[in-house]
Image (tube, rainbow, N blue to C red):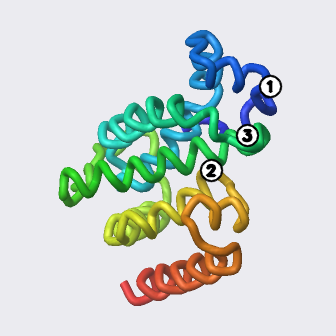
């Protein structure tokens, strides 16, 4: 996964306006800058399924381009795009009505002597995350993958900032309990 902070701080408001006006080159700059951020969030929501995540991001871009003119604050472009992608990831899962199956990877020969307890903890966490509803994975992805704050998460999910914090706190407590009990 790529660094979500990125090299380029943000896209200039003029580029956003040009893309909203139909300039494909301006949209391409926006896509280049934010595609990986959107994909990272979608991968988490889709339970690690990179193909489903790509489907969601591909579905999100035309929506974003159509609605780009409605973006009020150009500084909010990244959280706005990530929110659209998160919504599309949940839609992809609803449409497909699937259970994501965990991929079992072969052991890397260079890590044979590594502490297996750490791998078990990661496997337990991955299993616990897959058991979550897509909406819960979206909340975690928006906070820990996209690094949005509670105000941004609240706007993305249509809830208050305090509601976002409360939901996140309850979700983290539930995950901790499941990991301790498991």
Q: Which mark is residue 146?
A: 2
Assess disc 1: are there few (<14), some (14-19) or many (≥20) residues with their C-alpha within 10 Å of its C-alpha. few
Whichever of labels 3 and 1 marks the residue nearer the N terminus, that label is: 3
Work out whether 177 lies above or below 90. below
For label 1, the residue is: 12
What residue do we see at 48% from left, 45% from top?
Answer: 85
Whether tag 1 and tag 2 are in contact, CB under 8 A, the answer is no
What residue do we see at 47% from left, 31% from top?
Answer: 61
Q: Is residue 106 left or right of residue 136?
A: left
Q: Is residue 69 left or right of residue 173?
A: right
Whichever of labels 2 and 3 marks the residue nearer the N terminus, that label is: 3
For label 3, the residue is: 5
**Which of pointers 1 and 2 indicates the residue nearer the eye?**
1
Label 1 secondary element: loop
Work out whether 135 lies above or below 63. below
Distance in Å between CA atoms under marks 2 and 3: 9 Å
């Amino acid at each position: 996964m790529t660094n979500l902070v990125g090299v380029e701080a943000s896209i200039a408001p003029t580029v956003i306006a040009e893309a909203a006006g139909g300039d494909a080159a301006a949209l391409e700059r926006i896509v280049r800058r934010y595609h990986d951020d959107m994909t990272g969030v979608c991968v988490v929501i889709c339970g690690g399924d990179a193909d489903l995540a790509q489907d969601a991001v591909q579905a999100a871009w035309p929506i974003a381009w159509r609605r780009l003119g409605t973006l009020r604050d150009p500084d909010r472009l990244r959280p706005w795009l990530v929110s659209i992608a998160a919504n599309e990831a949940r839609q992809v899962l609803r449409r497909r009505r699937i259970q994501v199956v965990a991929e079992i990877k072969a052991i890397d020969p260079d890590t044979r002597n590594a502490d297996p307890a750490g791998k078990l903890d990661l496997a337990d966490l991955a299993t616990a995350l897959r058991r979550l509803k897509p909406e819960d994975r979206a909340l975690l992805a928006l906070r820990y993958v996209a690094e949005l704050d509670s105000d941004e998460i609240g706007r993305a999910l249509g809830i208050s900032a305090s509601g976002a914090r409360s939901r996140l706190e309850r979700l983290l407590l539930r995950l901790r309990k499941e990991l301790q009990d498991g």
